[in-house]
Amino acid sequence: MKKISLNVNGKDHILEVEEDMRLIDLLREKLGLTGVKEGCSEGECGACTVIMDGEVVNSCLVMAFQAEGSSILTIEGLGDEENIHPIQQAFIDVGAVQCGYCTPGMILAAKALLDKNPNPTEEEIREAISGNLCRCTGYNKIVQAIDRAKEVLR
Amino acid sequence: MEAYKAKSIDEVIRLLSQFEGKGKVIAGGTDLIIDIRNKKVKPEALIDISSIDELKTIEDLGSFIRIGAAATFTDLVESSLLDENLYGLKKAAREVGSPQIRNRGTIGGNIANGSPAADSVPPLLCLDSTLILRSIKGEREISLRDYYEKGFKIGEDEIISAIQFKKPEGRQILSFAKLGLRKALAISRLSIATLLEIGGDNRIKTIRIASGSLGRHPLREYKVEEFLIGKDFNEEVINEAVLVLKEAMEERLKGRATLPYKQRAVERVFKDAIYGGLERLKVVEA
Ligand SMILES: Cc1cc2nc3c(=O)[nH]c(=O)nc-3n(C[C@H](O)[C@H](O)[C@H](O)COP(=O)(O)OP(=O)(O)OC[C@H]3O[C@@H](n4cnc5c(N)ncnc54)[C@H](O)[C@@H]3O)c2cc1C
Ligand code: FES
Ligand code: FES
């Protein structure tokens, strides 16, 4: 076991983690943040996407001990029913959520994009979500939702 | 398994020596974590180098550029030192995987992992890059070419600390083109990097060509280089160069099922690299 400290969704934690634990396991099992989804476990699908120190990463490809000292944002930290984030609202309004499995990762990819580039082109939006697979929507609705969110956020 | 988040190069090499070959460096983890989960590697210790600042800097050393081994693909994409004539290296970094992979994957991991499809390697081969290695015994340098061609090894107690190369001179332009996704069947993957300079007399003054996925490791295509050097630059010559490249592939990949497809596909990738580079040069010089 190894003791690490990190900040998740604005809260500081000191946790004991197994050496072979991944960040996704820490978030889901130790902290109960089940909005972090596990799909492929090998970096292909983006369902496990979180924002780590301002950048999107696949939490299935980060070891928990590597996250020592970092700040992590998961979908739970972005907003909830009472405090919904404009990107989440846009996904609902446009109908960009079907089964919802890809949605947390998509929304976090959108958030990381809009934080850096508040007025992205459609091409830039598509590039930003290129590491996130969706089996349901065919992506157009998702792109529209992010485009709408950017107008609201500006 | 033990796990260490190292804070300095000295700490890393001390740990590597202490674990006598059974410790493994982890940078972005985008190759290694998958290998560990598939039980392809079973290290006794993981030594994380992903937050060591001295391994992440991209430095301008006058006529050379030095890239810290733990610089991520995103760091390369965002570096202003890799604009202009070094555009091919930046392009290779920009086309890696996805934003998530580029934010974690490092140039040192790309080289050390040893995939024939490692995208940063063909541009680095065109630049005649040098690997700077560190262990508790000290520092040594090996050329990236020797690393592949002479089968030089990175010791179990060594890390790549940086990659260094001379800046392209004058009108030399580095370019890169690739085909196929990493997960696509191996048959449809290939990449080409070129360093090209056309003199005032329209003759090819500098040409270096390196390929990815056209052999067991990325390699320089010397036969094509020899064919092109000094020739007048025109479409016909480039078409002939494609034939020379196909012949070289034939020798190397004879009998492989992937050969016919790759021979057909290589023409476009090669031309994309050559002409894409010249387009870029116009922008640089504008
Ligand atoms: C979904 C996905 C898409 C990908 N797409 C691409 C692509 O388009 N192009 C491409 O080229 N690659 C691609 N990759 C492969 C991978 O991301 C790259 O090879 C990356 O550069 C590996 O770097 P890393 O820092 O993650 O290495 P790690 O996984 O941390 O390490 C890989 C190996 O290198 C060793 N190592 C790492 N750093 C050093 C060092 N400084 N000194 C000595 N040894 C070291 C480790 O011990 C390990 O053996 C992809 C991977 C995934 C999962
Ligand atoms: S579960 Fe991490 S990328 Fe698919
Ligand atoms: S909504 Fe089902 S995978 Fe995207």
Image: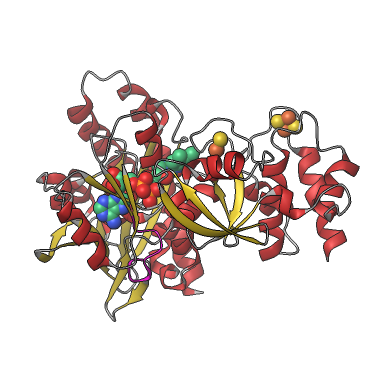
Residue A96 among those drawn in magenta: no
Which quarter of the figure has residue B135?
bottom left
Residue B180 placement, left or right of A84: left
Q: Residue at x 30, y 30 (%)?
A: B40
Q: Residue at x 35, y 35 (%)?
A: B36
Residue B245 versus residue B66 in the image, above or below: above
* View extreme (bottom): residue: B62
* Quadrant in the picture for the N terminus of chain B: top left
Residue B160 versus residue B189 in the image, above or below: below
Q: Position of residue B257 (x, y in %)?
A: 31, 18
Q: Is residue B119 visible?
A: no
Q: Is residue B57 visible?
A: yes
Residue A88 placement, left or right of B50: right
Residue A11 placement, left or right of A146: left
Q: Nearer the viewer, residue A36 or B198?
A: A36
Residue B50 among those drawn in magenta: yes
Residue A60 versus residue B183 in the image, above or below: below
Q: Residue at x 54, y 44 (%)?
A: A26
Q: Nearer the viewer, residue B281 or A115?
A: A115
Q: Position of residue B281 (x, y in %)?
A: 44, 66
Q: Position of residue B60 (x, y in %)?
A: 34, 77
Q: Position of residue A12 (x, y in %)?
A: 61, 62
* Residue numbers of the magenta segment: B48-55
Residue B280 placement, left or right of B3: right
